[in-house]
Image (cartoon, rainbow, N blue to C red):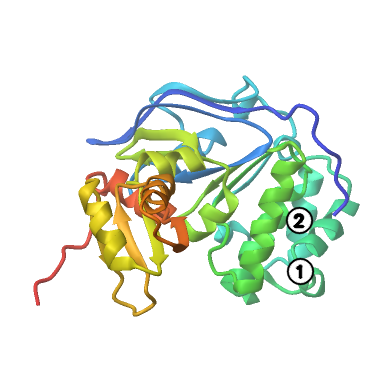
């Protein structure tokens, strides 16, 4: 897909946003900003308010209080909005009786987008050979690709995706990951809501995390993981028992892994702590590395008390 590098994409600005459905406050005085040039992951348990926030940003729901703007302007004030914002919020929204090409042609015509863009985005989304098929014959993954093609149609500077990998096969997941990074690399503003922690860890540069409609975190990926995990080191030595004893004298507990690989884990330590002690006592260390927590571990630790719907552990 031929694109032009964005020079100054607008930010998404959410200020004191509040939305209630009856007695349930779905979004509670929420404030954050999504900046251009990076992929921002939008995380939170089911019921955290992510989808409601996205719907308010694109004018599908109205806030009770606060604001959500794009470059300082609310979505309803944008002329030809697909040229400004591309959004995938519901892959099932396309009319099943239309072909993929006709669906995109209608969107292009309504936003004065050149008709040539239709075939360009169909090719980009891997749907060129299915362009003439009725949408009702599409698999979930194909509908996702069509929704992404529609989001790209106006070559917009701002893109928002809600669970974009839903229904995609492994090749499709790699494609969407690469696409998100490329769009951000072009200077666009990219916000991606997902429950796939592994994919978010590979794709996002920054995280916004919600819990029960409130902001829990707004920070860089590395800072988030570091701030919600404990330091831990994995090591392997020629003299593990002697090193274990010296570490114990220094206040560290080394525990052997049970997988038979010879590795030991030391909680609460950094590699330099272990290396310094080993060098002081002349103990050879074969391998020594940070055993960083995953995004999933850090996320679960932060949101443990925020999930509205959670399964209870069963005793066995």
Q: Quadrant of residue 305?
A: top left
Quarter in which the C terminus is drawn: bottom left
**Neighbour tally class for label 1: few under 14, some 14-19, many 20 plus, Cα within 10 Å:** many
Q: Nearer the viewer, residue 53 or 268?
A: 268
**Which is more N-terminal, label 1 or label 2?**
2
Q: Residue 77 in the image: x percent, y percent? A: 65, 24
Residue at (48% x, 53% y) in the render? 194
**Neighbour tally class for label 2: few under 14, some 14-19, many 20 plus, Cα within 10 Å:** many
Q: Nearer the viewer, residue 314 or 240?
A: 240
Secondary structure beneath dot 2 equals helix
Q: Is residue 56 left or right of residue 149?
A: left
Position of residue 308 relative to residue 103, above or below, is: above
Secondary structure beneath dot 1 equals loop
Q: Give the residue at the far bottom of this rendering.
A: 260
Quarter in which the N terminus is drawn: bottom right
Residue at (49% x, 42% y) in the render? 222
Label 2–label 1 contact, CB within 8 A: no
Residue at numbered disc 1? 127
Residue at numbered disc 2? 104
Q: Nearer the viewer, residue 73 or 10?
A: 10
From mark 2 to mark 1, how far is it between C-alphas? 12 Å
Position of residue 303 relative to residue 27, above or below, is: below
Residue at (43% x, 28% y) in the render? 63
Q: Quadrant of residue 10?
A: top right
Q: Residue 147 in the image: x percent, y percent? A: 65, 57
């Amino acid at each position: 897909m031929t694109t032009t590098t964005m020079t100054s994409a607008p930010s998404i600005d959410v200020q004191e946003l509040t939305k209630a459905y009856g007695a349930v406050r779905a979004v509670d005085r929420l404030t954050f900003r999504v900046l251009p040039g990076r992929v921002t992951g939008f995380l939170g348990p089911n019921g955290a308010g992510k989808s409601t926030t996205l719907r308010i940003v694109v004018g599908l729901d109205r806030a009770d209080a606060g604001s959500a703007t794009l470059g300082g302007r609310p979505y309803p004030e944008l002329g030809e909005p697909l040229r400004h914002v591309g959004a995938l919020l519901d892959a099932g929204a396309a009319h099943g009786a239309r072909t993929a090409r006709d669906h995109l042609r209608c969107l292009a015509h309504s936003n004065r987008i050149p008709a040539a863009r239709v075939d360009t985005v169909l090719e980009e989304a891997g749907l060129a050979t299915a362009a003439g098929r009725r949408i009702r014959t599409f698999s979930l993954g194909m509908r996702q690709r069509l929704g992404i093609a529609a989001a790209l149609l106006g070559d917009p500077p701002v893109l928002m995706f809600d669970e974009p990998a839903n229904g995609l096969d492994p090749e499709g997941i790699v494609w969407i990951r690469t696409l998100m990074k490329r769009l951000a690399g072009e200077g666009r503003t990219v916000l991606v809501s997902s429950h796939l922690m592994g994919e978010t860890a590979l794709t996002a540069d920054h995280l916004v995390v919600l819990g029960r409609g409130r902001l829990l975190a707004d920070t860089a990926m590395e800072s988030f993981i570091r701030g919600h995990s404990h330091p831990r080191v994995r090591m392997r030595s020629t003299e593990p028992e002697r090193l274990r004893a010296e570490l114990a004298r220094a206040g560290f507990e080394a525990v052997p892994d049970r997988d038979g690989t010879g590795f030991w884990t030391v909680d609460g330590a950094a590699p330099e702590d272990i290396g310094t002690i080993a060098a002081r006592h002349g103990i050879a260390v074969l391998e020594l590395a940070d055993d960083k927590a995953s995004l999933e571990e850090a996320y679960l630790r932060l949101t443990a008390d925020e999930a509205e719907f959670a399964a209870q552990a069963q005793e066995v």
